[in-house]
């Protein structure tokens, strides 16, 4: 059967606005040679049929239907459990456009390499056409894409993570433009695995992995790497940020966008439950998004943000009734779990959940502590955002929410205090640009190694960081009402190796200080690296922290910071003349203040 000449199952949609899409699907089918083509409509029966098929072939294992209805476990290939940054490329005509922050290949070489992998790869398989919309379907800030994939697991995840199906296709038909993503799991061979981006062509090609960020192309590939390009061109920002609304006892809601690197606390902060005293006083927290934020200046000069996603692809380990009750409540039904362990009564389990002992580990082996953690450290849940008890009613607002504060943060065992505020926008951009963080299990490679991860975008910025920082600086325009910028570190440790700050719900205290700074109510003291909370202006009531621990938590060591800023200056200079002078000058200002 020749899939190139006819749509075998499911008819191709009519309408001349879709010629472009139909032609691309025809070409992809000619290249990959699937047995069947299925156009996804995103309906419930379609999802049910996909799940049933995956259950029949073992791709999905049913979990305990009494405790976790409509929930499944997927065990991935053990060599396919995280993003692969060393195999991720940005293919621009000029190497400089991708910058030293990306792996680069010319578009011609990139296409040739990928097309050789795709040739005939879908024989015996079904090609799924997955139209999706990133952002509320009627939002002017939203953008559409179409993913072609041979993985029903990817289709099911895309349905949870995006607005997928008929409505997205209708918008594509109206607009005529969309991001093209071609994906195949291939043989899941790490030696034949690449994720390539062609920003000028709004195209993604991903081969050989079924894992989240490598395979759900709407997420990091489209909503960050490709979108960051579009954003630069069109005057907006595509960021690796959560969006959370904080409602104070007066009923005012301030929205905060926060960039932390992968597995550094975005989902947790986005779903925070206030400490009891705050709850009693009337504080509430509203989740808008947990991973990606698109924002642009509104008519009033403020930045307005949408969450382009419709679901959460969250880290399972560490999620518990104590750390993140909202996440736990969200994943009691209708959830796909990937690479978690199971208990003897077939409930999903991971380290940090509770004291039970699992029966099977993430690879399906009888649990043996000698084999390492029962759940993979990067095991995940996929769930609709609508299932989150704190899901904000404003999350579906097509105009987005106004942002009061932008927060940068990393995982730093030493040096960096709990919170500080940037002096102004330019300093704020420097604070973001000079972020460092210890690596985590969200990407393959060593864990716990400190690296520069500007704005948590090191793996995700689809163009040269020097140009990206210039783009950030460009928002400081007359009439702009930009958010205040802060830096946080939940992960500073004491000499005993323990975290100094309790974190999680208690982080609301830090957000409260930020909001009061925005309102001009709380005071700060000037330090060379920025503004620190003035004692008495930061609520520590009920935390039970000794004065000594508190001093360690907020300590700014000028000698150590001088070393840090020498390194930061060198890092910025390594980008060459394209690095904005303004940013280097700002780093010099801090360095001078430290001397
Ligand atoms: P990605 O989905 O990979 O982008 O990760 P994320 O930034 O959403 O990270 P997430 O919220 O899932 O947290 C990752 C890990 O950090 C989990 O093991 C959490 O338990 C831990 N964590 C989150 N917040 C805190 C905190 O305030 N303090 C401490 N000590 N750990 C935290
Ligand atoms: C991350 O690694 O930052 C994630 C998970 O949010 S993934 O979708 O794989 O990128
Ligand atoms: Mn992420």
Image (spheres, helix red, strand yellow):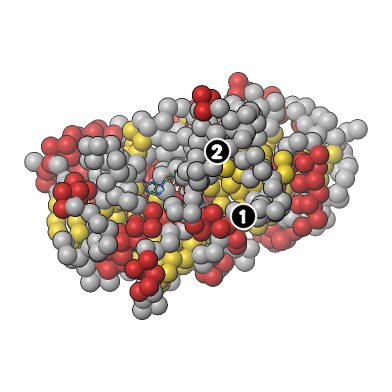
Could you tell me if the residues under marks 2 and 1 are in contact, i.e. CB atoms within 8 Å?
Answer: no
Q: Which mark is residue 9?
A: none
How far across and how far down the image is residue 194, in percent?
59, 29
How far across and how far down the image is residue 432, in percent?
32, 47
The residue under the point 60% across, 62% down is: 386
- Badge 1 marks a residue whose secondary structure is loop
Does label 2 point to a residue whose CB lies under 8 Å from ligand 1? no
Count of marks overlaid on the render: 2
Report if residue 124 is visible in the image: yes
How far across and how far down the image is residue 176, in percent?
68, 55
Single out the mark in the foreground, 2 or 1: 2
- Alpha carbons under labels 2 and 1: distance apart: 19 Å
The residue under the point 24% across, 61% down is: 540
- In this view, the residue farthest toward the top is 191
The residue under the point 34% across, 68% down is: 277
Q: Is residue 294 left or right of residue 516?
A: right
Query: Which callout, 2 or 1, points at the residue further toward the start of the chain?
Result: 1
Q: Is residue 84 above or below residue 476?
A: above
Q: Is residue 30 left or right of residue 586?
A: right
- Badge 2 marks a residue whose secondary structure is loop
Q: Between residues 183 and 115, which one lies in front from this camera angle? A: 183
How far across and how far down the image is residue 582, in percent?
24, 47
Q: Is residue 88 left or right of residue 536?
A: right
Q: Is residue 292 above or below residue 4?
A: below
Residue beneath disc 1: 332
Q: Residues within 10 Å of mark 1 (few under 14, many from 20)?
A: some
Q: Between residues 177 and 73, which one lies in front from this camera angle? A: 73
Residue beneath disc 2: 357
């Amino acid at each position: 059967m020749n899939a190139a000449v006819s749509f075998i199952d499911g008819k191709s949609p009519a309408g001349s606005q879709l010629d472009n899409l139909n032609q691309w699907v025809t070409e992809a089918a000619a290249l990959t040679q699937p047995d069947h083509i299925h156009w996804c409509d995103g309906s419930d029966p379609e999802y049910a049929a996909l799940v049933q098929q995956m259950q029949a072939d073992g791709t999905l294992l049913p979990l305990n239907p009494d405790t976790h209805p409509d929930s499944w476990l997927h065990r991935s290939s053990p060599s396919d459990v995280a993003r692969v940054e060393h195999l991720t490329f940005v293919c621009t005509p000029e190497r400089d456009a991708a910058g030293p922050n990306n792996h680069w290949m010319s578009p011609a070489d990139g296409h040739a390499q990928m097309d050789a992998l795709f040739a005939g790869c879908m024989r015996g398989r079904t090609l799924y056409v997955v139209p999706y919309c990133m952002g509320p379907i009627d939002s002017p800030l939203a953008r559409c894409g179409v993913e072609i994939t041979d993985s029903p697991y990817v289709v099911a995840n895309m349905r949870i993570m995006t607005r997928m199906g008929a409505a997205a296709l209708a918008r594509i038909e109206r607009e005529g433009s969309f991001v093209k993503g071609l994906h195949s799991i291939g043989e899941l061979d790490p030696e034949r695995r690449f994720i390539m981006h062609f920003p000028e062509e709004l195209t993604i090609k991903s081969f050989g992995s079924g894992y989240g960020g490598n395979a759900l192309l709407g997420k990091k590939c489209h909503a960050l790497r490709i979108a960051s390009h579009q954003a630069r061109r069109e005057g907006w920002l595509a960021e690796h940020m959560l969006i959370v609304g904080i409602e104070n006892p007066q009923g005012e809601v301030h929205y905060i966008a926060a960039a932390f690197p992968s597995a550094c606390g975005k989902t947790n902060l986005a779903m925070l439950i206030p400490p009891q005293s705050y709850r009693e006083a009337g504080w509430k927290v509203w989740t808008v998004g947990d991973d990606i934020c698109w924002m642009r200046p509104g008519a009033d000069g403020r930045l307005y943000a949408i969450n382009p996603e419709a679901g959460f692809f969250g880290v399972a380990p560490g999620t518990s009734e104590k750390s993140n009750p909202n996440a736990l409540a969200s994943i009691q039904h209708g959830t796909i779990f990937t690479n978690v362990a199971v208990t003897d009564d077939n409930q999903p389990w991971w380290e940090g959940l509770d004291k039970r002992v699992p029966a099977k580990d993430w690879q399906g082996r009888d649990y043996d502590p000698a084999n390492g953690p029962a759940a993979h450290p990067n095991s995940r849940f996929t769930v609709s955002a609508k299932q989150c008890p704190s899901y904000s009613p404003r999350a579906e607002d097509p105009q987005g929410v106004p942002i009061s504060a932008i927060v940068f943060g990393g995982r730093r065992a030493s040096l960096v205090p709990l919170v500080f505020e940037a002096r102004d926008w330019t300093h704020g951009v420097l604070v973001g640009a000079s972020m460092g963080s210890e690596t985590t299990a969200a990407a393959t490679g060593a864990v716990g190694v400190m690296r520069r991860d500007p704005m948590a975008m090191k793996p995700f910025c689809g163009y040269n960081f020097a140009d990206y920082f210039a783009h950030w600086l460009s928002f400081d325009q007359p009439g702009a009402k930009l958010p205040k910028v802060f830096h946080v570190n939940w992960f500073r440790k004491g000499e005993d190796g323990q975290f100094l700050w309790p974190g999680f719900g208690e982080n609301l205290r830090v957000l409260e200080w930020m909001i009061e700074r925005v309102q001009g109510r709380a005071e700060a003291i000037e330090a060379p690296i920025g503004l620190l909370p003035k004692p008495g202006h930061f609520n520590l009531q009920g935390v039970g922290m000794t004065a000594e621990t508190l001093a360690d938590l907020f300590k700014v060591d000028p000698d150590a910071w001088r070393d840090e800023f020498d390194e930061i200056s060198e890092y910025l200079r390594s980008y060459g003349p394209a690095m904005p002078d303004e940013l280097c000058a700002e780093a010099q200002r801090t360095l001078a203040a430290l001397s």
